[in-house]
Amino acid sequence: MMGRMDEKDIIDLRSDTVTRPGAAMREAMARALVGDDVYGEDPTVNELEKRAAHLTGKNAAMFVPSGTQANLIAQLVHVTPGEEVIAGEHSHCMRYEAGGGAAIAGAQYCVVPGNGLFTANDVKKRLSARTLHNPGTCLVWMENTHNMGGGIVFDTDEMARIWQVCSENDIRVHVDGARIFNASAATGVPVSEYASCADSMSFCLSKGLGAPVGSLLCGSGEFIDAARRMRKRLGGAMRQAGILAAAGLFALEHNVERLEQDHDNARLLAEGLKATRGIEVDLESVKTNIVMARPTRMTAPVLSARCKQRGVLFHPLTETRLRLVTHLDVTREMCVQALERMREALGS
């Protein structure tokens, strides 16, 4: 067993949420102009919301503390309690948001089995009209990239077909775009094109973009007006939030183009693990900055514990599945070191 390691020797691949703001981002935060955002008077928040609306091609946007709150607000606006939401298996809104959609928004979910992606035909098969007995479908939920699917990307042509089906049946569409800029970096498709297939979209600033806090919820002016009331109800309305919004503006300006580096590093990890005895990786599923792997010599929790002793952190999702996530605080050299330490832990 290795002794206690210095923080500088730790390679943290648990999530892209662990990034820390650098000196330039901290400087932007310190210099931010601020006001009372509840009154709509914070100029930096207003600028961030305007930028987000422009990037997504929507009429308006709202800054919120977290992606979880953005997703919950979207459900509160779109869903009448008791109605049904069609979503892919293991969607974040169902599995990793403490059941808020059900407990607070009153949503119930119709789950499409698989890797998180689904088709327009999958939606058609699951549409439910509201009757005396049936809840009725009111919302279709797409997560792009899909967190538990290994960072895989929804195809825009399929998204457009899903949007068409929903439009024909008066059903709303939301895109949980927590990592939508990763999807855009991987495909070259503008974020606005993804957003055009939905009534609303959320995206996260504190994942691959490297800001310390915050997400944006984007949609029509009417939608955002309703969303602001829900944000207030949930306690998410902030005051001099420009200090945080400045980090988001910096991230959108400086940290979008570099996302391809994270994807390259994830590919390096995936290919290195693929060539390692005692672990399996499906290279076809590695599209962005998330690598899913299956250890074959030991359980994922045991491997995680062994790697932690060696200064490599990642999440064991189940007994047989683990996840590694690259981000701006992980260099190519660190990925090479992580592979060496993981091979040592595996006994390869």
Image (tube, rainbow, N blue to C red):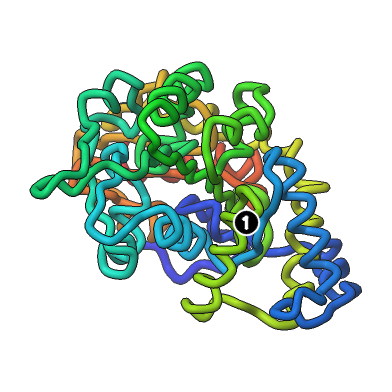
Residue found farthest to the left: 133
Q: Quadrant of the N terminus?
A: bottom left
- What element does badge 1 sit on? strand
Position of 81 with respect to 213 (left or right) is left
Nearer to us in this view, 262 or 77: 77
Q: Residue placed at 25% from the left, 37% from the top?
A: 295
Residue nearest the observer in this picture, 80 or 89: 80
- In screen coordinates, is 319 left or right of 274? left
Where is residue 209? Give x, y as percent: 67, 50
In the depicted structure, whether residue 61 falls above or below residue 143: below
Q: Which residue is mark 1?
A: 216
Residue at the location (22% across, 48% down)? 318
Please tell me whether residue 327 is drawn above or below residue 294 in the rendered image: below
Q: How many marks?
A: 1
Residue 55 placed where, x, y %? 73, 41
Q: Can you give x and y, in whole percent of width and height, for residue 290 in the image? A: 47, 38
Horizontal side of 117 relative to 198 (left or right) equals left
Q: Residue at x 48, y 28 (%)?
A: 153
Q: Residues within 10 Å of mark 1 (few under 14, many from 20)?
A: many
In the rendered view of the protein, which quadrant contains the C terminus? top left
Determine whether 17 is above or below 54 in the image.
below
Please say whether residue 343 is visible from this viewpoint. no
Q: Amino acid at mark 1?
A: Leu
The spot of residue 139 in percent (x, y) is 36, 43
